[in-house]
Image (tube, helix red, strand yellow):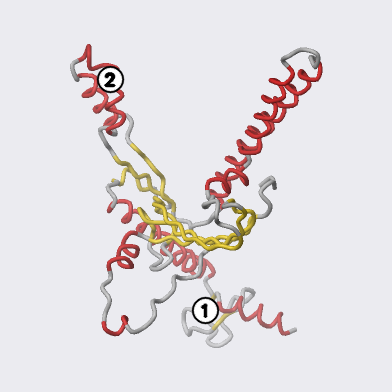
Amino acid sequence: MGSQRRNRHERRADTYCSNCGTALESSMNYCPSCGDRIDRATADRSASTTVDSASRNRLESRIAAAVRDGWELEHDFGDHAVMIRRTFGSTDEHLVVALLTIWWTMGLGNALYGVYKYVEDADRMVLRSEPYGADDAEQSASSSHLLHRVTAVACWLTAAVLAAIGVAVATSGLSPLLYVLAAGFVFLGMASLPSVSSRLARRHSLLTNGRTRSVEERSVVDYERPCTACSEPVGRGIERIYRAEFCLLGVPLTGSEGRNYYCSRCANAEVTEPPTAASSSEPRQADPEPESTETTADATRLD
């Protein structure tokens, strides 16, 4: 009964009388206090306007963060916007073009390539007004993991075929070579698994054994993810990864990790903020709790 009353109260709180302000239930057509007729369309438009205003403010904040990083607004569709950034190409690209064309174009190839990059091949991205969610990131990660798993299966099938051929020609001198190749493909298949490759990429020194903690920072570009400190779009900021792992010969076997994201303003303020007399006598405030944590299991587990 108590939960039903709370549910009715929550429904009443969504709509109010425009004349006297009394909370109304969804089934009411007239206000019980003043008798004024309830205009449902006005109430629905008011709630919709509040949601649209919050979404619009979120989108404009993301657009402003992208503009500060050199992007330009190409199209604004209300619920999403298309940003564009025109360049003449990177230095590496022009070096490759120069090596291929400088001997017969005398630099004209680089000029044409720069015009093409600026006019026809500009960088574009789409910013949306929805609150940030990890669905897109998880979908991208799952597709990448699927590719790695397919690679691992292909390597293991190749190893099985080589081993079978080695057994079939056991009397010849090729069987040891075939066994070595099969073992190599088995190792490549294991290294292709996301769980194994990620651990090998995070390996420590060989003297690292037992539980260890580490903090890693890397640059990120994300105009839809909010900053952990100020809740503004991260834009060109940093990702700070906190890990607690159990290592054997430097290779993490199990562990947990959490991530925080900071915009460049908050990251620079944290690094360059001068110590004051009050703060010098007090211990430094710890970073906020990581936004997300995940625990990894045995290295041979198929993620």
Q: Which mark is residue 99?
A: 2
Instruction: Say left or right for 189 vs 228.
Output: right
**First in sequence: mark 2 vs mark 1:** 1
Which three-letter amino acid code belongs to the residue tagged 2?
Leu
Q: Residue furthest left?
A: 106
Name the residue located 56 percent from the left edge and 79 percent from the top edge.
13
Dot 2: few (<14), some (14–19), or many (≥20) neighbours within 10 Å? Answer: few
Name the residue located 63 percent from the left edge and 59 percent from the top edge.
295
Q: Which residue is labeled 1 in the image? A: 16
Quadrant assignment, res 237:
bottom left
144 and 64: which is toward the camera: 144
Against 177, is 183 above or below? Answer: below
Location of the N terminus by quadrant is bottom right
Whole-angstrom CA distance, mark 2 to mark 1, is 72 Å
Number of labels in the image equals 2
Q: Position of residue 99 (x, y in %)?
A: 28, 20
Q: Which mark is residue 282?
A: none
